[in-house]
Amino acid sequence: MNTTSFANTVALLGRSLRHMLRSPDTVITTAITPIAMLLLFVYVFGGAIHTGGSYVDYLLPGILLITIASGVAYTALRVFTDVSSGIAERIQSMPVGRSAMLWAHVLTSLVANAISVVLVVLVAIAMGFRSGAGLGAWLAVTGILVLFTLALTWLAVIPGLTAKSVDGASAFSYPLIFLPFVSSAFVPTSGMPRPVRWFAEHQPVTSIVNTIRHLYAEQPVGHDVWIALAWCSGLLLLAVVLATRTYRSRVT
């Protein structure tokens, strides 16, 4: 990315962030809803769920993934709005780097999700979450969450470019938000029926959640970290290729 494209991307990033801050629905969904879920599961359901330790410590990694999935859903809507309203074509008619618009939406998602994740972690600490993890473990958790955010964000760009309606673009988020419920995010998979357990243990959320949980608990991450990295890296590579090709064919 040259200096001009970088400046274009920063300018479009500022535009996208301003639109996001002016949308109360976005703020409520990406920041307040995950915190409400954290409070609900810990203080209402947590007493009936046995995980062998503090439930807020067990639950936090799953809530972080739901926070990101909820925030990423708005990327599809923002891209859809720009494309369907003609803003994308107008930007392309100006001396603006071809990839600037997509990168602006991706960076907006990274910034918004980083803020939401920090808020959720601070609330979890206030609720009793504790971790003796060192700086390396926290950086590893940050790296995994950034990779997960990038993979889902580029994936969200595809329905944003191809959807025919707002409902079509927003429907992208439902499977992402549902997946953590059929994983080890809220309860151990050992108590699930065999077919559900098999699905839960072989879908990407479980390996990512287990890796983050073990890093926070200063425990060996085992093979979960390689499975998590493979899922995130594979999804990211596939999504970038498909999103870029779709963007080139959609916006001429």
Image (cartoon, rainbow, N blue to C red):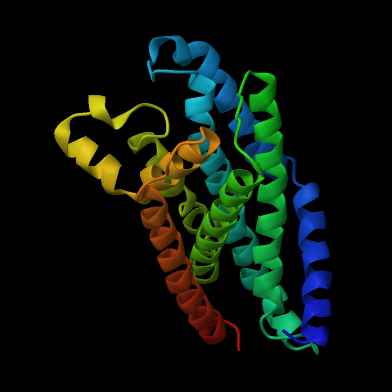
Residue at horizontal 71 percent and vertical 30 percent from the top:
122
Q: Where does the C terminus fall, quadrant-wise? A: bottom right
Q: In the displayed orientation, state which residue is furthest to the left.
A: 194
Residue at horizontal 35 percent and vertical 38 percent from the top:
183
**71 displayed left or right of 14:** left
Can you give x and y, in whole percent of width and height, for residue 81 in the image? 65, 64
Is 173 above or below relative to 154?
above
Is 18 above or below relative to 46?
below
Can you give x and y, in whole percent of width and height, for residue 5 in the image? 77, 83
Quadrant housing residue 56: top right
Quadrant housing residue 127: top right
Q: Where does the N terminus fall, quadrant-wise? A: bottom right
Residue at horizontal 64 percent and vertical 65 percent from the top:
106
Report the front residue among 238 and 189.
189
Is 7 above or below relative to 213?
below
Residue at horizontal 52 percent and vertical 55 percent from the top:
148
Can the viewer see residue 140? yes
Quadrant housing residue 33: top right
Report the front residue among 69 and 216.
216
